[in-house]
Image: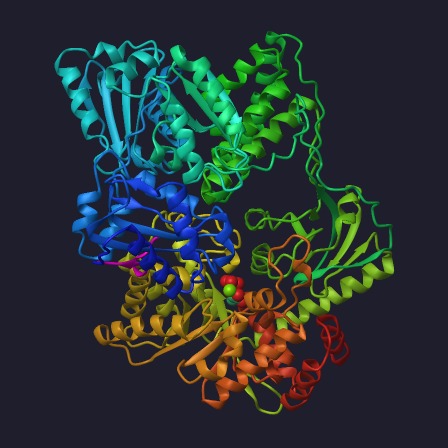
Amino acid sequence: MLELNVTQIQMGHSAPDKQAALALLAEVLSAGGLVAPGYLVGMQAREAQGSTYLGQGIAIPHGTPQTRDQVHCTGVRLIQFPDGVDWGNGQMVYLAIAVAARSDEHLHLLQLLTRALGEGDLSQALREAREPEAIVALLQGAPQELALDSQLIGLGLAVEDFDELLWQGARLLKKAGCAEPAFANQLAQGEPLPLGNGLWWLHSDQAVLRPGLAFVTPAQALEYRDQPLRGLFCLASLGEAHRQLLERLCDLLIEGRAAAFSQATSSRSVLEALGGEVPADWPVLNIILANAHGLHARPAKMLCEVAQAFTGEVRVRLAGEPGLGVSAKSLSKLLSLGARRGQALEFSAEPAIANDALAAIEAAVQAGLGESVEPLPTQAAAPVVVPPTNAVVKLPAPVAGARIQGVAAAPGIAIGPALVRVPLCFDYPAQGQGVAAERERLNAALAQVDEDIQRLVETRAEANIREIFITHQAMLRDPALAEDVAARLLQGASAEAAWHAEIEAAAAQQEALHDALLAERAADLRDIGRRVLARLCGVEAPREPDEPYILVMDEVAPSDVASLNRERVAGILTARGGATAHSAIIARALGIPAVVGAGEAVLSLAQGTPLLLDGEHGLLRIAPNEQTLEQARHQREQGELRRQRAHAERLQPAITRDGQRLEVAANIGASAEAAAAVEAGGEGVGLLRTELVFMDHSQAPDQATQELEYRRVLDALDGRPLVVRTLDVGGDKPLPYLPMPAETNPFLGVRGIRLSLQRPDMLETQLRALLSAAAGRPLRIMFPMVYGVEEWRVARDMALRLREEILLDDLQLGIMVEVPSAALLAPVLAREVDFFSIGTNDLTQYTLAIDRDHPTLSAQADGLHPAVLRLISMTVEAAHAHGKWVGVCGELAGDMLAVPLLVGLGVDELSVSARSIALVKARVRELDYRHSQALAQQALGLESAAAVRALMEESD
Ligand code: PEP
Ligand code: MG
């Protein structure tokens, strides 16, 4: 996806005419390595087909489909022409944005630009800008319009007090995409302002996504603070968008027209009074866009011309999106939709012209809007009801006595009955037995589920889990959802069909917002949706066995694992998944034995089947005989003894039998874990995953907040070294308050140090906090995902610059080696860094090209693959040649089969979860360094991870 940043902008150029400007732009694109010189021909041809002038002094020249093969990589370059360039028809361009794109990657950029082109004219400001930063601010910072339409008005709501009314207002804003879920809390912290006549005002600018105003009234007059409560305005405020509206509201109240709100019976009258978007009762046409590259400039222009041929309003929006859409006569507004191939556009037109206008639009869109279009694949006629089905193919269950090899994900031996959790399958009629009967069934099911959840709320000790269930209850009681379901019942739907359709629609709407937090809400909605369906259909979820059980699932999400009851769950078995998936890391941290990637047949196991799971070796036994069980119990006891012995010696150093010393440190994610890590024998912290500190806050923690966290770790370490990784988000780790555009390949996208270098302000704050917190104590800072010297040097220079200000003697700067290029370049990097820490989780995924969280492939992402071992070996050799040290902080460091190899390869430090420290130390003490070296050399010459594992099992 294309983004704007200052490095792409060149200021103060001039060009005598458009052709000269195009030549200059092509040259700049080519010098940036984005296109071949032949791209200029495409840019000229494109202008010949139609001007790329966008409005407000901006043009967006680009090539044609014929010159797409001239594009090396997608990107943009911006050139400012303060004296202007005539782009034809007297349209002066002060800023030209040259786009190099193969397909529709630039749509997002167009969307951004056209949204920026709001009501005011930017051309003068673009012309007068002196710095590239000013251009970026102008293009990104245009004020957003205040949302105010019928979906933001809720009249006559069944609420009992002020708080409930406030919650309803916040809910409408959230539903309209104006606010995040946290908005309601923020709003509640504000001071309500009485406006007279029972009207109240509340606003907040926290957790706001775009400005919007909601107005809600209670069904019956209530009292609040000894005054009547007849209506509440809730403002999600962002910038100045609401100023005009607020002035208008004040005028109305002064004129004595408060009754327009306090006694309103229709949203239309409220909107008319406030000047909001009044819903039009206009004919509508839905049509799917088939243009390969979406509604980009050329087809948009043609569509605009078709609409302009009619005197009267024609509006368009993406089907299902809130709001009234945009004028189809405005090119910039059309582009701002960002419509892609396959998306449905919903046109509406004034009744007087609707017949002709919609027909003309339909014909034009179907004809391809000036482009030849591939027809869309034909869709099968949609069934009336789509019951959720069990998506997993049912394979025959493994037989008693079977031995299944999965992937070792968390050590330990678990014995217990299976609790197989697969998606429930529902079957129900589309049509109901009459509205009253269906309503009654639905209400009964809702009440039962509410009660079930209430029981969960009351029995859970953990506050965070209770909160999840309380949210589920709120969703269940959502009056808007109830209203929409009731409307479907009135149309004759069965309770199941009506409920399922509305839950799906609400969940899809949340997901469409491309926000990790809202996507989680969608999962919550589906979760309660299934609970209610199960009640309606009489389908029962399997009952938990009385004794501790082995949870069998397709795959587990990290949040599933984190919310497990450790007293009840003896072990985890999954059909899919791998050892470095974050859910496996959490299972290890919680000490729950886990085997993952055991194959789909395990999902067919009968409930209660006795299972034996060996999380150390990734082994599963189905209904094992008494002898096998006896052996396992013995093994478990031995393991327990080993653990106890290791625990007793956890504070002793890890020295091999022939005197080679290794440091064993802890991987932690929260400052509060540091003390326990030291208690567990940690000789320091070898990896502080600071993103977890960031994730704990609802907005980016400022320097003081971070300092407090880091100081707490350093205090607990009491002089032991702290290795901190700077913020590592992106890829599979989103940060809710740092929304990132969706990427096709997030693991290969803006992750780790790449993101930090795009947000140097955040990196600088973090480094300042770290240096200040250290106050003379040993601090090692490392940067994640570094792929070459350039990123390292920029980050290092920033740290060194700050160290001039915030003095610290014992500071080392290094990088994580998690990208193969960094390992291959280790001889060069080793000259400059103070240390390397090898992140084998990512190094394995990037070396073997297997997504570490891939549902079916990640089981093969084994860090003992000789290709990964070779990279580790190269890194250690290069580092030692320059007198630098190397740690390993990926999961491999805690894998008992891998420890002898890592020791043999010369690694100086192993950083593992606190739970594994004592065992890793004990393992090191059992080793002979020379023998380990020989084993390591042997392993480097092997052909596969399996062969390496076999070698290590044999030599054990
Ligand atoms: C790694 O990649 O090995 C690592 C330690 O980082 P994370 O697992 O947090 O990506
Ligand atoms: Mg990593």
Res 424 quadrant in image: top right
Residue 207 makes an appearance in the image: no
Residue 827, percent from left and from top: 49, 84
Residue 575, percent from left and from top: 71, 51
Residue 767, percent from left and from top: 31, 67
Apparent side of residue 775 relative to residue 445 in the rendered image (left or right): left
Q: Which residues are magenta?
A: 4-11
Residue 895 makes an appearance in the image: yes
Apparent side of residue 908 relative to residue 31 in the rendered image (left or right): right
Q: Examine the structure image and report whether residue 521 is included in the region drawn in magenta.
A: no
Q: Nearer the viewer, residue 950 or 278?
A: 278
Res 27 quadrant in image: bottom left
Report the number of discs: 0
Res 932 quadrant in image: bottom right
Name the residue at 23% across, 18% down.
199
Residue 406, percent from left and from top: 74, 59
Q: Examine the structure image and report whether residue 6 is included in the region drawn in magenta.
A: yes
